[in-house]
Image (cartoon, rainbow, N blue to C red):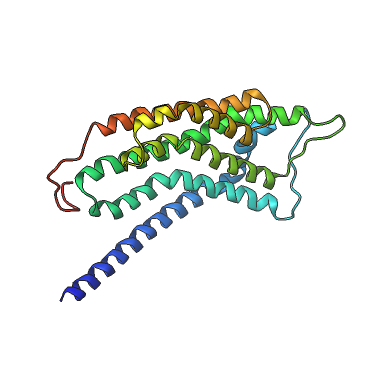
Amino acid sequence: MSSVSTSENFISHLLELRKRLLNSAIALLVVFVCLFPWSKDLYTILARPLLAKLPKGGQMIATDVTTPFFVPLKVAMMAALLISLPYILYQVWRFIAPGLYLHEKRWVLPMIVSSVTLFFCGMAFAYFAVFPIVFGFVTASAPQGVAVMTDIDKYLSFVLSMFVAFGLAFQVPIAVVLLVKTGMVTTAKLREARPYVIVGAFVVGAIFTPPDVVSQFMLAMPLWLLYEAGIIAAGWMSHTPPPSNLPPRGQGG
């Protein structure tokens, strides 16, 4: 009887997972179809930081036959994923929420929302603050007689890698809070490690930005400030312990 019940629970979980995955895929497809007619415009917006820094008459190029079609298509898919991401995460939440305690729900959901928000903030920071400086430096560094004409596919790869790098960098507060929440480290130890974190932030800035002080500083300072914000958030959460009388998983709202 017990094995039959376990099998039924497993199948019900698989059916629920399939439902959530299907809902997410449909949402992504619908948004992509809506954005597809404006895929070229989306790429133009994405390329604007570089186009604004090119010399007068400068332009981007496509070296492959199919690149002019597939690159805007990739941009439209990326934009569709970002737009539908809140709904996709909502589906994930609906799948895992029944297995959580009430106090777990109270901190897991804010962590998910904060993580997505910070990732978007990292992308926005890269697009509006970092890209103009990086592309200005690159185009100004071109030798005399060299025309800067970047391939649109390589530009997309560079932009995506920078978006991911800055999006992950902005997850520092989440990582700090999780380390404290799981008991792996205390806020006192994190404060003691502050000098090493500052040095590490400038090392990361030197790796992921062009070799100029301004762009390195623009990445290092947010990393440090986000680390400090993580310490403050972790300290606040450590003063709100979970209740001693826990309801069964899946109950309590």
Residue located at (63% from left, 32% from top): 206
Determine the residue positioned at 60% across, 29% down: 130
- Report the residue that reaches farthest toward the top: 214
Examine the rendered structure and indicate whether residue 154 appears above or below residue 10.
Answer: above
State whether residue 53 appears in this view: no
Quadrant showing the N terminus: bottom left
Q: Position of residue 19 (x, y in %)?
A: 33, 61
The one nearer the camera, 206 or 34, is 206
* Residue 227 at x, y percent in the picture: 44, 30
Task: Point out the residue furthest to the left here.
Answer: 245
Whether residue 119 is situated above or below residue 70 in the rendered picture: above
Left or right: 153, with 57 as reference point = left
| Left-right relation of 32 to 208 | left
The answer to whether residue 66 is visible is yes
Image point 55% across, 28% down: which residue?
199
Horizontal and vertical percent for residue 144?
Answer: 86, 29
Left or right, 16 with reference to 69: left
Q: Is residue 177 left or right of residue 36?
A: left
Most foreground residue, 232 or 130: 232
Q: Residue at x 64, y 42 (%)?
A: 158
Check the image and report above or below for 172 versus 20: above
Q: How many discs appear? A: 0
Q: Quadrant of residue 147?
A: top right
Picture coordinates of residue 76, whole percent (x, y): 55, 47
Residue placed most toward the observer, 79 or 105 = 105
Q: Is residue 7 above or below residue 108?
A: below
Residues 188 and 169: in front is: 188
